[in-house]
Every structure is written in structure tokens, then in C-alpha cells.
Image: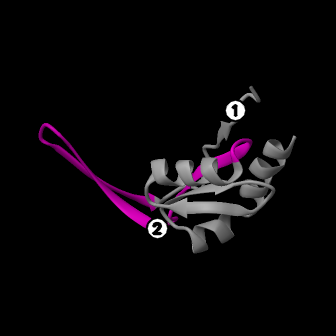
Amino acid sequence: MAVTQDFNWITKRYPELQRKYPSQYVAIKNRRVIAHGHDAGKVYLKAKRDVKKDFVTAYILSGDPFVLEIMFGSEHSIVGGQVASTVYPIRESIPDN
């Protein structure tokens, strides 16, 4: 249940997380950021070392505008937009053995 609450917390606080941790991975436990950084592996290992299990990791998109140039043969298009606010959580749970 705590993992679900953490996922919901990320969703509700996403704009704030984008301001504090743009283009970074975050690890969340009990509605608190326990690790963050640009290297997913390091964030995961720090969270695992500190809290062992039942944490959520997510990549926080920057929200920056972007320009995408598409070339296909002689066709050429330029598309602009905003990076979406999408959360892709990963649940970490290690059985107690």
C-alpha cells in the first residue's frame, strides 16, 4: 500500500518535482525523495542501500520545449512541442528471506 501512496504522491507533486529534479531519476519512499540524480543505476543502488525495498523510482521529465526535425527522403518537417509530464514508476520489492 505504501508504494501505491508513493506513486500517487509523485503524480500529485509532478510539477514541483520537475522544478527541483528536471531530467533526473528520483527514488521515493513514504512520500519523500530518498535519492536523485542523472544516473538511474546510482539512484537505484543508493535507494536500495538506504531503505532496502518497497520504494518507487521514476524519471522526471524536464518540461522544456523541444524542436524535432524529421527527415524522410526528400521530405522535411519541423515539429515543436512540450515534453510531457509522464511518470513511469518502477516498484522495487525484495522478498524477506
Where residue 74 appears, as percent x and y from the top left, is 12, 41
Tell me the SS state at disc 2. loop
Q: Residue at x 68, y 47 (%)?
A: 56
Q: Which mark, by number, is residue 64?
A: 2
Q: Residue at x 68, y 38 (%)?
A: 91
Q: Determine whether, in the image, residue 54 is placed left or right of residue 41.
A: right
Tell me the SS state at disc 1. loop
Where residue 59 appears, as percent x and y from the top left, is 54, 52
Residue denoted by label 1 = 94
Where residue 84 appears, as percent x and y from the top left, is 55, 55
Q: Nearer the viewer, residue 92 or 5?
A: 92
Q: Tag 2: residue type?
A: Asp
Q: Residue at x 81, y 43 (%)?
A: 4
Examine the residues drawn in magenta and state their main secondary structure: strand
> Which quadrant of the view contains residue 95?
top right
Q: Tag 1: residue type?
A: Ile
Q: Residue 87 in magenta?
A: no
Q: Determine whether, in the image, residue 45 is placed left or right of residue 65.
A: right
